[in-house]
Image (cartoon, grey):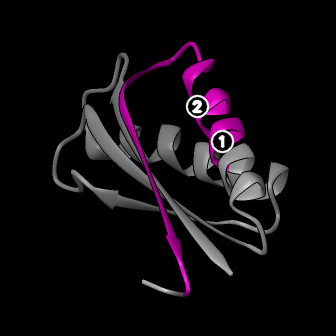
Amino acid sequence: MYVGALTLDILLGDVHSLKQKRSVVRPLVAELQKRFPGVAVAETGHLDLHRRAEIGVAVVSSTAGHCGEVMEACERLVAFRPEIELLSARQRLYNDEE
């Protein structure tokens, strides 16, 4: 068993309040969950900043390759959104021996 953890640090575009931030982040989280039904997605950081967000994605799979593919696809989906800028993406892969 392999567990993949993807952390996406994003900068939001023309956002001036936490309410506007939610209107950008919630649809992004929902789209990731809809497109990849086997992953867990949540806003995990920068909760008090209105122009920054951290999105966490978790994937469980029987192969390391599949975990990597899903994390790459999630990263691409976020990177190609025009209203946000992907500042960094960190991938970690854990197996049942760790």
Residue 37: image location, x then y, percent? 82, 64
Of tags 2 and 1, the one toward the viewer is 1
Q: Magenta region: which residues?
A: 71-96
Residue drawn at the location 80% of the way across and 55% of the way down: 36
The C terminus lies in quadrant = bottom left
Task: Count how many numbered circles sit on residues in the image.
Answer: 2
| Secondary structure type for disc 1 | helix
Q: Is residue 31 visible?
A: no
For disc 1, the marked residue is 74
Seen from the viewer's position, the closer of residues 51 and 98 is: 98
Above or below for 3 versus 52: below
Is 84 colored magenta in this rendering? yes
Residue 60: image location, x then y, percent? 68, 74
Seen from the viewer's position, the closer of residues 19 and 73 is: 73
Residue drawn at the location 49% of the way across and 44% of the way down: 25
The N terminus lies in quadrant = bottom right
Cα gap from disc 2 to disc 1, whole angstroms: 6 Å
Q: Is residue 84 visible?
A: yes
What mark, if any, has residue 78 been given in the picture? 2
Above or below for 9 versus 44: above
Above or below for 39 versus 88: below
Image quarter of residue 41 = bottom right
Residue 73: image location, x then y, percent? 71, 37
Residue 26: image location, x then y, percent? 55, 51
Left or right side of 43 for 67? right
